[in-house]
Image (cartoon, rainbow, N blue to C red):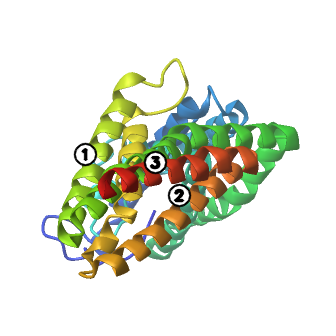
Amino acid sequence: MFSFTPLSFAPGRRRFADLSEREILALAISAEEDDGRIYAGYAERLEADYPATATIFREMAKEEDGHRRALIAEHQRRFGETIPLIRREHVADYVSRQPIWLIENLGLERIRAEAERMEQDAARFYEMAAQRAGDAGTRRLLGDLAAAERRHEHRAEELAETNLSGDGRAEEDKTAKRQLLLTWVQPGLAGLMDGSVSTLAPIFATAFATRDPHTTLLVGLAAAVGAGISMGFTEAAHDDGKLSGRGSPLKRGLASGIMTTVGGLGHALPYLIPDFWTATVVALAVVFLELWAIVWIQHRFMETPVFRATVQVVVGGALVLAAGALIGAG
């Protein structure tokens, strides 16, 4: 939870070194409340697809609540019932937390890594807070909480062993891989194929019709960008992902649109070269690499047999290229 940052002297925010012991306790209470809610939010987010990991986060949320109660009791003992309002955003050199909606969209392993970082930050904060404490009871409590946070990584492993068997972890990892494929890889691959193949005909037809690299470049840019916009909107609009389980339409639209544009730009950009034949040879080499890269991606991520992927991508792409070149030359 705690680290020194360049924001130490930000106007309107206190420095950790300037906080009183009462304010440190109040800050720790609010931080434990926030972390408990974050873990509970992770559990709710993961319940449907990763129930075993959700159970782990629910247990961690309970432990954070136990820390919160101990801190409140210590504040009551020393300073009474009224707890000052101070939160992590009020302290300049206090580490921030990413909003849960940013983390939860990055996948299972990212959530697990963020939880581990949270526990490490909490341990550092309690270690430094214990050094500031003058009261023996407060110092002991903060030291105990620092040790508890240091043990939490091992505690998480223990909870994982209890709630997440080898088969359970394998099943959750399989689900995470499937979600990655459905949300990012499949739309991106479809876009890359469309951009790489569908733009071949207009680019090479223009190239052989005009023998002008600049005109070919402009047509190629227009074809790539236009295809990217079209594919992106189509992917995002035709399925909201709720029934199909394919994930966020925005993510799928971005993956499809960007990769479509990239696929088209690959063999358009060589026409920045002023010599027509040099540019065309480079563009053909890029097309060759693009098509075989798509074959590899299909085989690697989609488990498509190499022969079938070769026929679909390389042979199909060669036919489109030849059609464009023949039309342009005619």
Q: Going by the image, does 113 lie left or right of 90?
A: right
Question: Distance from label 3 to label 2 (Cα)?
Answer: 53 Å
Q: Amino acid at mark 1?
A: Gly
Q: Please identify, in this view, whether the residue under mark 1 or under mark 3 is nearer the observer.
A: 3
Question: Please, which residue is most extreme toward the right here?
Answer: 166
Nearer to the camera, 316 or 95:
316
Q: Quadrant of residue 61?
A: top right
Q: Amino acid at mark 2?
A: Met
Query: Is label 1 in a helix, a strand or a loop?
Result: helix
Nearer to the camera, 145 or 108:
108
In terms of sequence position, does the residue under pointer 3 or pointer 2 come before the other?
2
Q: Position of residue 26 (x, y in %)?
A: 37, 52
Q: Please identify, in this view, whether the residue under mark 2 or under mark 1 is nearer the observer.
A: 1
- Residue at (34, 26) in percent of width and height: 237
- 2 and 1 marks in contact (CB < 8 Å): no
Q: Going by the image, does 324 lie left or right of 45?
A: left
Question: Distance from label 1 to label 3 (Cα)?
Answer: 18 Å
Residue pointed to by mark 3: 320
Can residue 86 be seen? Answer: no
Can residue 222 be seen? Answer: yes
- Residue at (21, 63) in percent of width and height: 210
Question: Please, which residue is most extreme toward the left here?
Answer: 11
Nearer to the camera, 276 or 127:
276
- As drawn, the label of residue 297 is none
- Dot 1: within a 10 Å radius of its alpha carbon, few (fewer than 14), some, or many (20 or more) residues? some
- As drawn, the label of residue 226 is 1
Residue pointed to by mark 2: 118
Q: Amino acid at mark 3?
A: Val
In terms of sequence position, does the residue under pointer 2 or pointer 1 come before the other?
2
